[in-house]
Amino acid sequence: FPMKLCDLFPVIVLFRCQLQDAESYTSFLARLPFKSFMIYDNSPADYDFDEGQLPVNAVYRRNTDNGGVSVAYNCAATYALERGFKYLVLLDQDTHFPSNAIDNYLALDGEVTLAAPRLVMRNGQPFSPVTANTFNLKGRALAPGDYLLECFSPVNCGMCIALDAFFEAGGYNPRVALDYADFEFSRRMSAVYPKFRVLDLELLQDFSNDEQRLEPLAARFRLYLSSAVEVTTYNWKDRLRLAYQIGKHTLALTVRTRSLCFLNMLCMQLIRGRA
């Protein structure tokens, strides 16, 4: 069937960001007459979000406990399915969409259960999709077409998911709140729909991280660990790949900050896991 704009239900996840300051909103959502879309705000209670300026087609949800993206996507998917939408479109607050982005989504046919754009960083390096069956989760500049989810995994932003397939796969794992949430979902999808489509669409991902202060880096690392330990592994290769990624990230932060706190947190997590 030909895709229509009214078939799409976007959800944008925000954290300490006003809607009008979110790049995905200004470059995509605000430019198109979507029937409805959801703003899922994970900002803490001390952040003052201006609901008075929201457009009439916006549905606002707030989670001051910061349940992560998985809870947000599951919430939006349930809302969309109950109201007759066919596809869920995932957005974040810091990705730029070109003016012709919607044409790629509307060109999808009903046989596509999962479609994703290519994401590139500001330095031109590919960010998504990434190789999913190797030790290095490296971004690949894939040509448009269909690929196996067991080989490549798209990153959340820009993904367009058929809602029937979303729920058949079990949705997002709420225990994997942030990091690895997209890889976990791709594995779930691959069990029921092995292929996904890479769109002829390139988005610009602002993935700069110049934070040098120990306290916010440590807080972010705690969130990273809490998601990483909940990732489902199916065999020893999966466990080894995950351990490699966690170890690599821990060592990178240790070198960057010259602090042993990240190694200490990892060790404490391992001890709790064995208790």
Image (cartoon, helix red, strand yellow):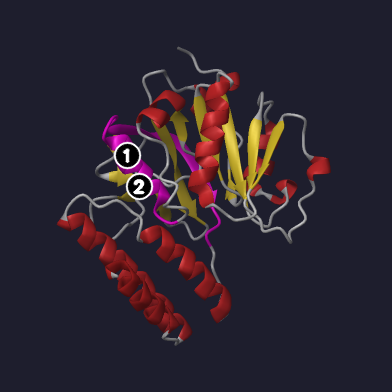
Q: Residue at x 64, y 36 (%)?
A: 38
Q: Are marks 1 and 2 in contact (CB under 8 Å)?
A: yes
Q: Residue at x 41, y 31 (%)?
A: 166
Tell whether 202 sits left or right of 130: right
Q: Residue at x 26, y 35 (%)?
A: 191
Identify residue for label 2: 184
Identify residue for label 1: 188
Find out whether residue 42 is within the magenta segment: no
Image coordinates of residue 157 in percent, x first then y, are: 50, 44
Task: Kindly report the distance in space between the C-alpha atoms of the residues bearing marks 1 and 2.
Answer: 6 Å
Q: Residue at x 22, y 59 (%)?
A: 239
Above or below residue 15? Residue 99 is: above
Image coordinates of residue 40 in percent, x first then y, are: 62, 44
Find out whether residue 183 is within the magenta segment: yes
Q: Amino acid at mark 2?
A: Glu
Q: Amino acid at mark 1?
A: Arg
In which quadrant is the N terminus drawn?
top left
> In which image quadrant can residue 11 be found?
top right
Could you say which is closer to the camera, residue 271 or residue 69?
Answer: 271
In which quadrant is the C terminus drawn?
bottom left
Could you say which is closer to the camera, residue 61 or residue 17?
Answer: 61
The mark found on residue 65 in the picture is none
- Which element carries disc 1, helix, strand or loop? helix
Image coordinates of residue 246 in percent, x first then y, are: 33, 67
Q: How many marks?
A: 2
**Residue 246 visible somewhere in the drawing:** yes
Segment colored magenta: 179-207
- Which element carries disc 2, helix, strand or loop? helix
